[in-house]
Each structure stands twice: as structure tokens, then as C-alpha cells.
Amino acid sequence: MCESNRFLTYLSAEVLSNTLFAFCPFFYSASVNHERIVRACRKEDLRFEPYDQDEWVADQHYNERTWADLLLLWKMFNLHIADVMESIPDAIALRKTKRHNFHRILFRDISDNASVNLLLLCKDYVAHLQHHIESLLAERR
């Protein structure tokens, strides 16, 4: 469905080993968006609870894990998310609704009365992920 695997080509231990703090957003973003994507397949609206990213990071104690474990977790989780995205039937991915809160939760700006679909959520996650990776790449220059 989504061209989701292309963002994984950016994964590199050298690029991502800048700091653990800079890497933490990848984890909560992956976890939250995975849940949103899976739940969206079974619901008519696209409304989701917002979350506090600082709490998510603190509560999961990433600083107690090895760097190698964190990289492997991030890589495998995002490969799984890519598989989930690609397995969503078009009828579900393209189903339009105006019942959403994307204007509050998406990385990109969107109107609260726009007609949206699950494909937009998937593409937004990939764009968000690419933004994080490009930020890390810029810091290393």
C-alpha cells in the first residue's frame, strides 16, 4: 500500500549514534503510530488520543538499554510497521472520513474539516520519520 520500506534505507548505526536523547523520538513515534495504524483498520473514524512524548520516553527507560539493542528495536519495529502498512487493503487505506483529529496529531498541517484517510496517516508517519533522520544527519555535518 504505502511506499514505506524506502525510509528504512536511511538506517545506519553511524548516522543514528549521535546521542541517545536525539534518538528517543523514534521510539515513541513508532509505538504510537503503530497503534494508530492498526486501530484505524477497524474503525470508521480516525480520531486518536494525543500523547505526552516526554512521559513516553521517561516511562520506557530507554537510557537503561544498550545502544545496539535500541538500534535493533527501532529497525525491527519499523520493518514491522512497514509490513503492516503494505498489507492494508486499498478499500481500508483509501476510505475517506471527515471524522478525525489529524489537525492535532499529524506531523504535517491539515485542516480540521479536511477529508482524510488511513493512507494519509501512513504517509505522514514516513514523512515524520524522515524528518527525524534528516535532523540527525544535519547535526552530524
Image (cartoon, helix red, strand yellow):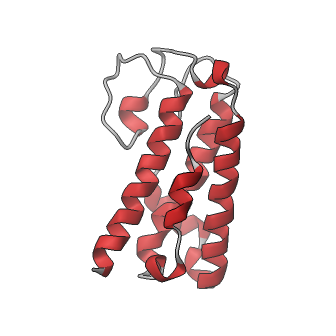
Along the line of sight, which residue is nearer the eye, 51 or 108?
Answer: 108
Q: Tell me where residue 33 appears, x and y as whole percent.
A: 56, 45
Quarter of the image with the C terminus in it: bottom left
Q: On the rendered structure, is 56 left or right of 76?
A: left
- Count of residue discs: 0
**Residue 73 in which image quadrant:** bottom right
Q: Is residue 78 above or below residue 123?
A: below
* Residue 45 sits in quarter: top right
Which part of the image, by quadrant, shows the N terminus? top right
Q: Is residue 23 placed above or below 64 in the rendered structure?
A: above
Residue at position x 38%, y 35% from top? 104
Residue 30 locus on image (x, y percent) = 57, 54
Q: Nearer the viewer, residue 32 or 17?
A: 17
Q: Residue at x 52, y 75 (%)?
A: 12
In the rendered view, would you say 126 is above or below 11?
Answer: above
Place residue 28 in its image quadrant.
bottom right
Horizontal arrangement in the rendering, residue 65 relative to residue 106 (left or right): right
The image position of residue 126, as x and y in percent, is 48, 48
Regarding residue 57, the answer to whether it shows in the image is: yes
- At horizontal 46% and vertical 62% (from top left) the residue drawn is 25
Identity of the residue drawn at 61% across and 66% down? 74
Q: Decide which of 90, 57 is in the foreground and name it.
A: 90
**Residue 50, can we see it?**
no
Q: Is residue 67 left or right of residue 88?
A: left
Residue 18 screen position, x and y as percent: 41, 82
> In the displayed structure, would residue 137 be above or below residue 34?
below
Q: Is residue 96 left or right of residue 133?
A: right
